Image: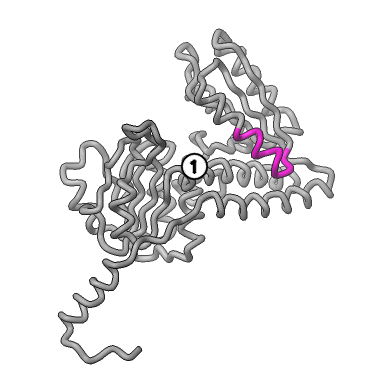
Amino acid sequence: MKRPHLPGVLHFFTDFFEFSNMTAQIIDGNALSKQLRTEVATRAQALKAKGITPGLAVVLVGDNPASQVYVRNKVKACEDSGLHSVLEKYEATMTEADLLARVEALNNDPAIHGILVQLPLPAHIDAQKVIEAISPAKDVDGFHIASAGALMTGMPGFWPCTPYGCMKMLESINYDLRGKHAVVIGRSNIVGKPMALMLLQKNATVTICHSATPDLKAMTLQADVVVAAVGKRNVLTADMVKPGAVVLDVGMNRNDEGKLCGDVDFEGVKQVASHITPVPGGVGPMTITMLLVNTLEAAERASK
């Protein structure tokens, strides 16, 4: 329908009104995961035809209930995609030396292409020391300093799974980051910092916000893309989001009713954003999917 000629200012208001009546498109992490896992299974079959089965070793020390659930999901995802997985469970009393010895044995095992030590570890074990003991060629979590350095300098290496999953979600909506302003809320080594570097690599202008940022709203209102990754409910509300922004919610919290929720006020923000990820069913499933992708890539590299 041809729009009648209107003065510029009226066009702005009609555009805004049209937009304000829309709700955000949901970026479905479950659906995208399913698609990517199908691709992983196909590539795994191609490697098997050459006599190589991609293998992931998952090491769990202690009996943290959340860790047990995560580990079970990771092992199941491997098996469903045709990857070989080994789950090694140890008592919380395991010594640091024994764990380091197990990591070294896995480093030298040609059937294992990826090694994941589930965090948190018992207090008497230095987690960083254990991560640094994993061979960078098998560091499918992307936590080794060599992996962080590779990401920093744009060299090949393994990207941490959660921010990597976020990038895949942006790719799935054909979002061009060049020249866009991305705001990352959170500065952890696992999500915030690597997320900022990945966005930068795609030519976004990146701002990292955190607990010492004085006026978070002033920053997020400028953002074309917001990634919320602090582990705090309602850190991003509708009044903090520019109309049409893309919002990725990495948080995992429980609301007053005990239901899973993210860092973003989903009901409010979806009235303003153009795209948003839900919790659950958003970034979560993508994290495990990217672990499979990294493991597969480790096997492909080892086979060359």
Which sits in the foreground, 264 or 96?
A: 264
For the N terminus, the image quarter is: bottom left
Q: Is residue 257 above or below residue 213?
A: above
Q: Is residue 225 above or below residue 229?
A: below
Give the labeled residue for mark 1. 284
Which sits in the foreground, 296 or 165?
A: 165
Dominant SS of magenta comes to helix
x 76%, y 33%: residue:
111
The picture places residue 197, in percent across and down from the top left corner, at: 41, 49
Q: How crowded is mark 1: few (under 14 residues within 10 Å), some or many (20 or more)?
A: many
The picture places residue 156, in percent across and down from the top left corner, at: 56, 49
Residue 151 falls within the magenta-colored stretch? no
Q: Is residue 97 above or below residue 8?
A: above
Element under disc 1: helix
Answer with the quarter of the image where residue 4 lies. bottom left
Q: Is residue 9 left or right of residue 125?
A: left
How many numbered badges does the structure rendering display? 1
x 20%, y 53%: residue:
239
Answer with the quarter of the image where residue 74 lies. top right
x 38%, y 46%: residue:
249
- Read off the magenta span: 73-83
Answer with the quarter of the image where residue 88 lies. top right
Which sits in the foreground, 99 or 214?
A: 214
Q: Which amino acid does label 1 sit on?
A: Gly
Q: Is residue 198 left or right of residue 295?
A: left
Q: Which residue lies furthest to the top in this view?
A: 93
x 49%, y 51%: residue:
154
Which sits in the foreground, 168 or 128?
A: 168
Residue 80 falls within the magenta-colored stretch? yes
